Image (tube, rainbow, N blue to C red):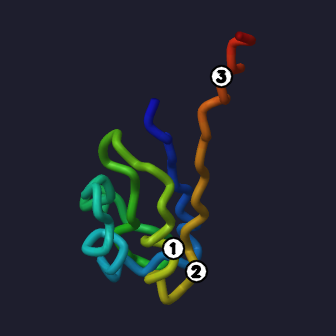
Amino acid sequence: MPVKGWIEVDELYCKGCDLCVNACPKQVISLDLNRLTAKGYHPAFLSSEGCTGCAICAIVCPEAALTIYREVPARRAKANV
């Protein structure tokens, strides 16, 4: 079962620089061109499923506007033989 992840974007800090969009290996982050933040930027958002929570987007974000979460599947118990 693949690892599932998601991001939260703090719109107070996101400046719509597009670095996270370009850095995402799964290409699941986009800028929301239909919305503006209070500072007038198009914020990043998780635009489709497939995020693994790798956190590359958070590493490249110059404003530290992204928080990454990762859900790790529960381990199966081994059968006693």
Q: Is label 2 in contact with label 1 (beta carbons under 8 Å)?
A: yes
Mark 1 residue element: helix
Q: Are marks 1 and 3 in contact (CB under 8 Å)?
A: no
In this image, 39 relative to 23: left or right? right
| Lower position in the chain sequence, tag 1 or tag 3 | 1
Q: Identify residue for label 3.
A: 76
Q: Circle 2: is it few (<14), some (14-19), or many (20+) Cα within 10 Å?
A: some
Q: Residue at x 30, y 53 (%)?
A: 28
User: Closest to the observer: 5 or 47?
Assistant: 5
Q: Residue at x 40, y 77 (%)?
A: 40
Find disc 1 in the rendering and name its residue: 58
Q: Amino acid at mark 2?
A: Ala
Tell me the quadrant of the picture where the C terminus can be found. Answer: top right
Residue at image point 66% right, 29% down: 75
Mark with earlier residue (3, 2)? 2
Cα gap from disc 3 to disc 2, whole angstroms: 35 Å
Which mark's residue is nearer the viewer, 2 or 1? 1
Q: What is the count of numbered marks?
A: 3
